[in-house]
Image (cartoon, rainbow, N blue to C red):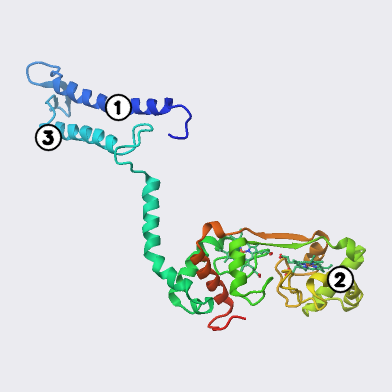
Amino acid sequence: MSDFTSNFWAIYVSGITIVSILACLLLLWFSGKAKAMTASDNTTGHVWDGDLREMNNPLPRWWAWLFVITIVFAFVYLALYPGLGSYPGKLGWTSSGQHQAEVEKGNAEVAPLYAKFSAMKPEDVANDAQAMAIGERLFMNTCAQCHGSDARGNKGFPNLTDKDWLGAGTPEYIKETITKGRIGMMPPMAAAVGTAEDVKNVAQYVLSLSGSPHDSVQAALGKPKFMACAACHGMDGKGISAIGSANLTDDIWLHGYGEAAIIAMINGGKVNQMPAQADKLTQAQIHVLASYVWGLSNKGGATAK
Ligand code: HEC
Ligand code: HEC
């Protein structure tokens, strides 16, 4: 109701509500008053199956009182709770207020738990079964839609269960990624590489880096052209975590495997973004989540790298 600029609809709705209730009362009163239609034997004159006659008796008293009670209830309810147009009700109850109160109660219950985890090192949190159960639920709610419910990712969405990281892969790095999100950016490189033939040759060279099937003649021709890539991916193609450039030697392909996918990468570049998640999570939740994600690829590991 509060979304309307004038209070016409509030009055309109209140009017209909009150008139409807009063109409019920009127109907009750009227049906109590109404006389039987035919005189002597108190029947309506309708007969079924030969001898089944419809009588016209007054409503039972208990029934009529039940009716009155529901009408009284309706008015009491409308006085206490929101229901009449924009009138908020004496109790000031709102569904969003109740939800808020329940959320706060839930938060207060888990606060000591989060306080405990926040004081622990991520490596230790990752070995705490209760924290990991919480981490898994948080992951399902906020991360699974992109990284998959098993955290193995998909094309464009990194697998978080392997040791292959665009960035540093430390708990701190994961925490920062969750908080601020990240943007992976590779510019289109075709012009820097040369002709379409050159691009194809570099792609063959990139395939050779991970020992994938490739044409060794083309790869050899492409190798010098890889100089254009080395600034970001390193001379050895292993990637530079500070830049977030992918490791090209590990046969793990975020943006697709094979010559065509690599050529598309070189020609088109890529902007791949994870949105910041800080506004959806508390600091303590991010701490538990980062520990959970770190734990996925460091099972049972007690030391961070
Ligand atoms: C809207 C989709 C989306 C959501 C939601 C999302 N991510 Fe991401 N995430 C991405 C994308 C895309 C990337 C890769 C960005 C890039 O290429 O640099 C990424 C990258 C990451 C990385 C870095 C991986 C690496 O190899 O360095 C981590 C860690 C991560 N996400 C964790 C999470 C966690 C934990 C959550 C839940 C709180 C989450 N993400 C929610 C899309 C998402
Ligand atoms: C300015 C830095 C930069 C340069 C120069 C650059 N890249 Fe990249 N490249 C990146 C980044 C960053 C990513 C990761 C994108 C992401 O986060 O999704 C990437 C990703 C890739 C991928 C995808 C890897 C995967 O796992 O799917 C390939 C293939 C690739 N680069 C090849 C090349 C080649 C070949 C060259 C040279 C012609 C090159 N790149 C030059 C920054 C660069």
**Image check: 240 left or right of 29?**
right
- Mark 3 vs mark 2, foreground winner is 2
Identify residue type, mark 2: Val
- Residue wearing tag 3: 62
Q: Residue at x 77, y 78 (%)?
A: 210
Identify residue type, mark 1: Ile
- Residue wearing tag 1: 18
The image quadrant where one finds the N terminus is top left
Mark 3–mark 1 Cα distance, whole angstroms, equals 24 Å
Q: Local crowd at mark 1 within 10 Å, few (<14), some, or many (≥20)?
A: some
Q: Which residue is drawn at 91% across and 66% down?
A: 197
Image quadrant of residue 187? Answer: bottom right
Image quadrant of residue 209? Answer: bottom right
Q: Where residue 272 appears, x then y in whole percent? A: 70, 60
**Image check: 285 left or right of 152?**
left
Image quadrant of residue 301? Answer: bottom right
Q: Which mark is residue 202?
A: 2
**Precedes in sequence: disc 3 or disc 2:** 3
